[in-house]
Amino acid sequence: MDLDALLSHFFETDDPTTLTEAEFALAVERVKIAFGVEREQGRRFALWTLLDALDEAPLPAEAFAKEPALKAAAEDYLKAAFRMERFGDGE
């Protein structure tokens, strides 16, 4: 899934910073609903990573309770994101 396409689809804009607080909250709710009903694993993981970027993602154990491979991938993603945040890009 393409991030620009996700933003355009769920936020109805290429720049979510232009949205009001209510519009932004509604868009996040649309992403949550889509994540909840999506069955294709790749799309489901992409929606979860978007929710994580928005600080709205459920924990991997909750999000992927019946999908051990996706749970492990989500945990790896969070570990990598933490390392990037902690250590940055070396600057």
Image: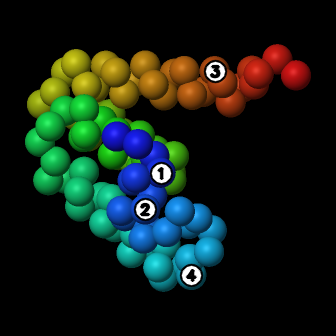
What amino acid does circle 2 point to? Answer: Ser
Residue identified by numbered label 4: 20
Residue 83: which numbered mark, if any? 3
Q: Is residue 59 left or right of residue 55?
A: left
Residue identified by numbered label 1: 4
Give 30 or 71, whichever is nearer the viewer.
30
Residue 36: which numbered mark, if any? none
Residue identified by numbered label 2: 8
Task: Check disc 3: other Cα within 10 Å, few if <14, some if 14-19, many if 20+.
Answer: few
Residue 80 coordinates in the image, percent (x, y): 54, 21
* Quadrant containing the N terminus in the rendered view: top left
What amino acid does circle 1 point to? Answer: Asp
**Disc 4 secondary structure class:** loop
**Disc 1 secondary structure class:** helix
As measured in the structure, the alpha-carbon distance from the residue carrying label 2 to the one carrying label 4 is 16 Å
Marks 2 and 3 in Cβ contact (< 8 Å)? no
Marks 2 and 4 in Cβ contact (< 8 Å)? no
Sequence-first disc among 4 and 1: 1
Of marks 2 and 3, the one in the foreground: 2
Q: In the image, what residue occupies the spot 16% across and 48% down?
A: 38
Give the vertical position of 36 relative to 79 (above or below).
below
What amino acid does circle 4 point to? Answer: Thr
Marks 2 and 1 in Cβ contact (< 8 Å)? yes
